[in-house]
Image (spheres, rainbow, N blue to C red):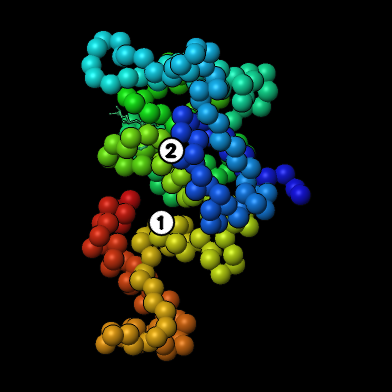
Amino acid sequence: MTAPLLALDVVTIFPEYLAPLSQSLVGKAIERGIIAARVHDLRAWTDDIHRTVDDSPYGGGPGMVMRAEPWARALDGLAPPEGPQPCLVIPSPAGRPLTQALAAELAARPWLLFACGRYEGIDARVIDYAAARMEVVEISLGDYVLCGGEVAVLVIVEALARLLPGVLGNSESAANDSFADGADGLLEAPAYTRPATWRGLDVPAVLLSGDHGAIERWRKEQSTARTRAIRPDLLDS
Ligand code: SAM
């Protein structure tokens, strides 16, 4: 088996939350050795009897903050300072919004280490500590607040995995997906399958015409109209 295209390490206090990594296309990519994935329990890097990972916030306020020391030990254990360094990905509402372009950027890295925050997040000094020797990217799924970074990691991994060569079958090229370069960054046109008439609703006639040029033009029009109606910001950019 050849070396994986992408190595993933995920550090979390809920390792079982990452079980879906073994499913579907990502699971197959792992099985086939395209992706190497390891999930780690942050509590393995604690040394008190209660395996404590959080403490109250300086300055007061509600909630708890994840302590820096277990995170530093996890980073040092998985990526010793003198060795090769991963790109550290920290899901955070304060991160760069996840886009197809950012997923493609991450898919080009050989090694991603994900740090799943919980509570009010991770002591901010962990970012400074890591950034002294590795690339750090904070990524937001959107303008809402999740309970933890695990779901965000699953989303990010799924978005980037399908961009890796060999993960999608030939018939499932990502090049024409919504937001892709091949789709000019627009939303994809609607899709239909058999039967041609279903419960009184017809498939657009052009898709049955066999005229590939006309189909291409129709898809482009649909794609532009859909984007204008739903996501005009994509046309602006
Ligand atoms: N107090 C933080 C704030 O208001 O920005 C929210 C902390 S949230 C309850 C706990 C963790 O969930 C975060 O550290 C982050 O890992 C994850 N998280 C929450 N919302 C997210 C989002 N929109 N995108 C990515 N990760 C998110």
Residue 161 x/y as whole percent: 54, 50
- Residue drawn at 28 percent across, 68 percent down: 225
Helix, strand or loop under label 1: loop
Residue 115 x/y as whole percent: 48, 30
Answer above or below: position of 2 versus 77. below
Residue furthest out toward the right:
1
115, 129: nearer the viewer: 115
For marks 1 and 2, give the one nearer the viewer: 2
Left or right? Give the position of 233 relative to 42: left
Q: Amino acid at mark 1?
A: Phe
- Residue drawn at 56 percent across, 69 percent down: 171
Residue 211 visible in image: yes
Residue 72 visible in image: no
Residue furthest out toward the front:
49
Q: Which residue is the site of mark 1?
A: 179
Figure quadrant, ligand 1: top left
- Residue drawn at 47 percent across, 64 percent down: 176
Circle 1: is it few (<14), some (14-19), or many (20+) Cα within 10 Å? some
Q: Is mark 2 within 8 Å of ligand 1?
A: no
Query: What's the distance in space between the residues labelled 1 and 2, CA to CA?
Result: 24 Å
236, 7: nearer the viewer: 7
Residue 34 x/y as whole percent: 65, 49
- Residue drawn at 46 percent across, 57 percent down: 181
Looking at the rendered structure, which numbered label has been put on residue 150?
Answer: 2
Answer above or below: position of 234 versus 192. above
Q: Earlier in the sequence, mark 1 or mark 2?
A: 2
Residue 85 x/y as whole percent: 62, 27
The quadrant in which residue 216 appears is: bottom left
Helix, strand or loop under label 2: helix
Q: Amino acid at mark 2?
A: Glu
Answer above or below: position of 42 versus 109. above
